[in-house]
Amino acid sequence: MYLNPKQRKRLFQRAHRRKTSFSEELRAALDFYLDLPLDFDEQAFAALVREANASMDRSIAKLDETLAFLEKFREAKV
């Protein structure tokens, strides 16, 4: 099995950051891939991830609005 230089570099970097070995990271990546269902649809999954990110962005914006409102309310009471 051959990895291109970019793949090797990224696996070594990940191993360094996670304090594991290159081999452990390679095995984990292979296990992750092999655990995917055979009918895994990458495009559908990517669309789901995009929608989840957009939903999180909306939730964070609402939380920021709520925090700003509460801060103004707290300042008015002081």
Image (cartoon, rainbow, N blue to C red):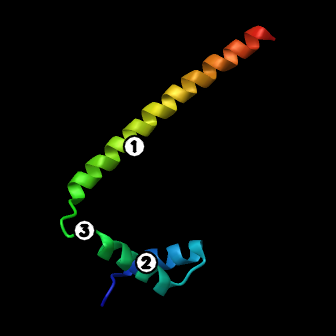
Residue for badge 1: 53
Q: Is residue 23 above or below residue 52?
A: below
**Residue type at tag 3:** Pro
Cα distance, mark 3 to mark 1?
Answer: 23 Å
Cα distance, mark 2 to mark 3?
Answer: 16 Å
Q: Quadrant of residue 77?
A: top right
Tag 2 secondary structure:
helix
- Residue 23 position in % (x across, y down): 47, 87
Q: Is residue 52 above or below residue 4?
A: above
Q: Earlier in the sequence, mark 3 or mark 1?
A: 3
Q: Earlier in the sequence, mark 2 or mark 3?
A: 2
Inspect this view and state whether residue 42 appears.
yes
Tag 1 secondary structure:
helix
Which residue is most to the right? 78
**Residue type at tag 2:** Ala
Q: Earlier in the sequence, mark 2 or mark 1?
A: 2
- Residue 50 position in % (x across, y down): 33, 45
Q: Is residue 65 above or below residue 14?
A: above
**25 sits to left or right of 46:** right
Residue closer to the observer: 13 or 31: 31
Q: Residue 7 got which mark?
A: none
Which residue is most to the top? 76
Q: Residue 28 got which mark?
A: 2
Cα distance, mark 2 to mark 1?
Answer: 25 Å
Residue for badge 3: 37
- Residue 42 position in % (x across, y down): 23, 59
Can you tell which of label 3 and label 1 is closer to the viewer? Answer: 3
Tag 3 secondary structure:
loop
- Residue at left offset 28%, top offset 52%: 46
